[in-house]
Image (tube, coloured by chain):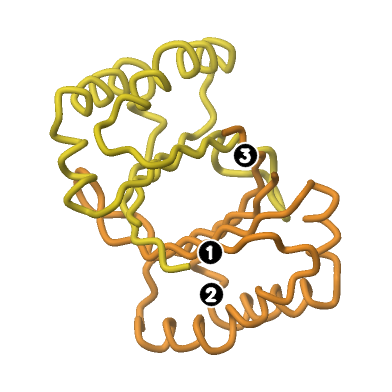
Chain colours: A yellow, B orange
Amino acid sequence: MVKLVALYKKPAELEDFDNHYGAVHLPLVRKYPGLRKLEVTRITGAPIGEAKFYMMAEMYFDSRDALDAALASQEGKAVARDILSFAAPLITVFIGEVES
Amino acid sequence: MVKLVALYKKPAELEDFDNHYGAVHLPLVRKYPGLRKLEVTRITGAPIGEAKFYMMAEMYFDSRDALDAALASQEGKAVARDILSFAAPLITVFIGEVES
């Protein structure tokens, strides 16, 4: 499996962020063609010090090709537009191969 | 479920890192008391630009209490000592609640 990981820093307006994330963003993410699994994690702390991030979303696909096709699709472009509208300064995104 | 997430930046010596990670570090991580699942992801890229990270490990526990107990155990202390020995400048760690 391959996954797309989105890490969000803590937003200034938590309630606005949470509302948009749940009501608008996640429904768009769930429309990615070929999405096999979505795991959303609310970050609550760290073993030492404060956590650098607020939320993480992991989107699993069968292959890198399937992930790239999802990003390039109309649904993927809608996700990207939405991120730019509410979370551009907060987000870090990367792609990885799940080994175990 | 609650998870402990370890994100590693790209090390200077990839082969040394990979060897230590696979032969020494992962066997120690697998000894965490109460560990329910371990997912290791090799980060291969990003949708735009370069990925900021090299590897991610996610360790799942039944609860925050179980996670805290694992970190405080002898096995958890061995993991922490090992991290300090090979990856201290590379690692970011946080704890989160899996929502979906």
Label 3 vs label 2, nearer the camera: 3
Q: Which residue appears at 15% of the width and 30% of the height?
A: A73
Q: Looking at this view, is B88 or B48 the one in front?
A: B48
Residue that carries the numbered disc 1 in the rendered image: B91
Q: Residue at x 37, y 26 (%)?
A: A30
- Foreground residue among B40 and B15: B40
Marks 1 and 2, how far apart at CA: 6 Å
Classed neighbour count for the residue bearing mark 1: other residues with Cα under 10 Å, few (<14), some (14–19), many (≥20) = some
How far across and how far down the image is residue B53, in percent? 38, 59
Q: Amino acid at mark 3?
A: Val
Q: Earlier in the sequence, mark 1 or mark 3?
A: 1
Relative to B14, B80 lies left or right = right
| Side (left or right) of A36 relative to B30 | left
User: Residues at marks 1 and 3, common chain?
Assistant: yes
Question: What numbered label is drawn on residue B98?
Answer: 3
Nearer to us: label 1 or label 3: 3
Q: Position of residue B25 (x, y in %)?
A: 59, 81
**The N terminus of chain A lies in which quarter of the figure?**
bottom left
Distance (Cα) linking label 1 and label 3: 21 Å
Q: Amino acid at mark 2?
A: Ala
The numbered dot on residue B87 is: 2
Q: Label 1 is found on which chain of the structure?
A: B
Distance (Cα) linking label 3 and label 2: 26 Å
Residue B36 drawn above or below residue A3: below
User: Do badges 3 and 2 share one subunit?
Assistant: yes
Image spot of residue A52 (x, y percent): 56, 43
User: At x 65% / y 42%, what residue is drawn?
Assistant: B96
